[in-house]
Amino acid sequence: MGVGRGSVTPTTSPHPNATVFDDLLHGIPLPLWAIYTIFASGGLLILLCLLCICIKCCCKKKQKKKKQKDQITMKGVKGQTTTTLVQPDVEDVDYGSTKQHRGTLLYSLEHNATKSELSVGIKQANSLKAVELGKSADPYAKVYLIPDKSKTFETKVFKNTLNPTFNEMFTFQLSKSKLLKSTVVIKVFDFNRFTTHKIIGELRVQLCDINWNHVREEWGDLEEPVKFEEVDFGEICFSLRYVPTTSKLTVVILEAKNLKSMDFGGSSDPYVKVQLALDKRKWKKRKTSVKKKTLNPYFNESFTFDVMFDQIKRVNLVISVWDYDTMTRNDAIGKVFLGCDAPGNQLKHWADMLSNPRRPVVQWHSLLSAEQVNSTLGLKKKIPLPNAQLFDNHFN
Ligand SMILES: *[C@@H]1O[C@H](CO)[C@@H](O)[C@H](O)[C@H]1NC(C)=O
Ligand SMILES: *[C@@H]1O[C@H](CO)[C@@H](O)[C@H](O)[C@H]1NC(C)=O
Ligand SMILES: *[C@@H]1O[C@H](CO)[C@@H](O)[C@H](O)[C@H]1NC(C)=O
Ligand SMILES: [Ca+2]
């Protein structure tokens, strides 16, 4: 066997025109191994080129796909595409999903059958979504039951966090039979002094599915809120101002919106009562004018009360919206109360007023049912005064 030829031929001879090829090769004034090497490198080069082209093509395809996906999600966010127009392939499903992460909530549920009491614990939330501009939120949670929505509770407001620790417990009176037909609704909102509070997400737990032998405590995902069940009694905006040196408490009733309609024809004739209680006894009372046939009245009416500095901590301010009726008794549309023992948002407004003396502090409030506020507040009869005349002169 020759050194050059013998060792190379076996690997290249499968060529059908081997003899012609061999003759050709012999005509070239180069050693055989060099020619084979040249051909081999040429082949390798071509292969490499082909590979490059292939990869490039694939990349372009992928980029195109990605672009398409970006467009889909952006359109989805704006709500301009219907899902029927978009048929994602299997690998796209996760990417193109419009389901947004709103955060998780740790809650607990417990029912005491002897006392007919349902306790709902709102423990903490994690990785809440920032729904307003900026990267944070001022979250608080609201909890109520459906179908009986007569009672709504609120946690305190937490400033500037997406991971609040609420640790609050709320109790509903509920028999076992009603329990099985009820659903707990927990909503997490982002507090905002000047507008309606944006909802971050909500959690619904059907109570028929639960084993009541144990306390249930678990994390749940906050979901997109159910639209049709929003605002119950309406919202009201007012400002509070306390000047300790002059002992003046000023309440400006600004406006209300989305009030519940109380009259035929889907409207109401709202007016607002501003009431003060001292040590849970009815004390002073004023009211705004009546706005005819509207669910979004604008008042801008101011009321000033004398409240001594040593009394301000024992005072409750009750704001109630009523529907004026000519023929029948006026009905309460909704109520809120403020004071040092008030819940959530209402306590916040009161505390902000006290910590900013002389400055008016404006805030929106969701109205609650009159029954709930009556029973939580538990006001007693009017303060008996030895001299009614003196009372009138002094305070009105
Ligand atoms: C229910 O409440 C009653 C009265 O307070 C108490 O004695 C009982 O232990 C409670 N039951 C449960 C399961 O917690
Ligand atoms: C609200 O009332 C105040 C005092 O009466 C007045 O100065 C102000 O201009 C009113 N605001 C509006 C928007 O009407
Ligand atoms: C709430 O209490 C007020 C006065 O205490 C009473 O006039 C009103 O009827 C009560 N409203 C309801 C719905 O219980
Ligand atoms: Ca009316």
Image (cartoon, rainbow, N blue to C red):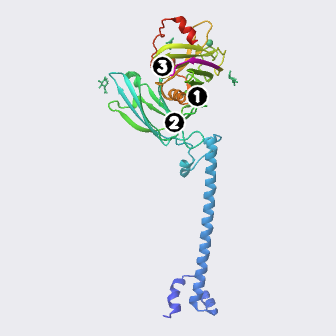
Name the residue tied to disc 1: 363
Under circle 3, the secondary element is helix
Tell me which segment is drawn in magenta: 301-310
The main secondary structure of the magenta stretch is: strand
Does 192 appear above or below 147? below
Could you say where residue 57 lies in the image, as x and y percent from the top left? 63, 63
Q: Quadrant of the C terminus?
A: top right
**Residue position for label 2:** 139
198 or 385, which lies in front?
385
The alpha-carbon separation of the residues under discs 2 and 3 comes to 23 Å
* Circle 1 Cα neighbour tier, 10 Å, few/some/many (<14 / 14–19 / ≥20): many
Q: Earlier in the sequence, mark 2 or mark 3?
A: 2
Residue 262 left/right relative to 164: right
Please tell me in which quadrant of the rendered image residue 249 appears.
top right
- Quarter-of-image position of residue 174: top left
Amino acid marked by disc 2: Pro
Circles 2, 3 touching at the beta carbon (< 8 Å): no
Which amino acid type is marked by label 1?
Gln
Disc 3 marks which residue? 372
Q: Earlier in the sequence, mark 1 or mark 3?
A: 1
